[in-house]
Image: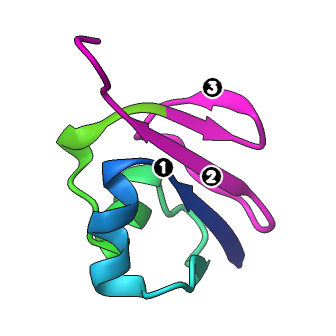
Amino acid sequence: MQVKLRVYADLAEEASKNTGDNYNFNVNPGTTVAQLLDEAGINNRNVRIVMINKSQAELDTAVRDGDEISVFPSMGGF
């Protein structure tokens, strides 16, 4: 299965250390958002909002083939 990960703000710096500019991942069925972030080198504790295909999701949500996962950090007192 292939998914696309979009990261924003400080999370982009964390991910680029391990992924460069490539945010397309081949994952196994049953892979969760948390597992994907771990593979990308992103610390789950730094993630505030998770979206899958523009709908809010949780870190323990399993991703599916073709999903676009967006993650946002906490910002400015949130």
Q: In which quarter of the image is the C terminus?
A: top left
Residue 11, percent from left and from top: 34, 54
Give the residue drawn at x 27%, y 66%.
14
Q: Please tell me in which quadrant of the rendered image residue 77 appears.
A: top left
Give the CA separation, mark 2 to mark 3.
Answer: 10 Å
Amino acid type of the residue tagged 1 in the rendering: Tyr
* Residue farthest top in this picture: 77
Task: Point out residue 4 in the picture as x, y percentages from the top left corner.
Answer: 67, 68
- Asked if labels 3 and 2 touch by Cβ distance under 8 angstroms, the answer is no
Percent x, y of residue 46: 23, 41
Q: Is mark 1 on a helix, strand or loop?
A: loop
Does residue 17 lie above or below 50 as drawn?
A: below
7 or 63, nearer to the observer:
7
Circle 2 sits in a helix, a strand or a loop, which is it?
A: strand
Report the Cα–Cα distance between label 3 and label 1.
15 Å
What kind of residue is marked 2?
Answer: Ile
Numbered mark located on residue 56 in the image: 3
Q: Which residue bears the numbered disc 2?
A: 69
Q: What stretch is highlighted in magenta?
A: 50-78
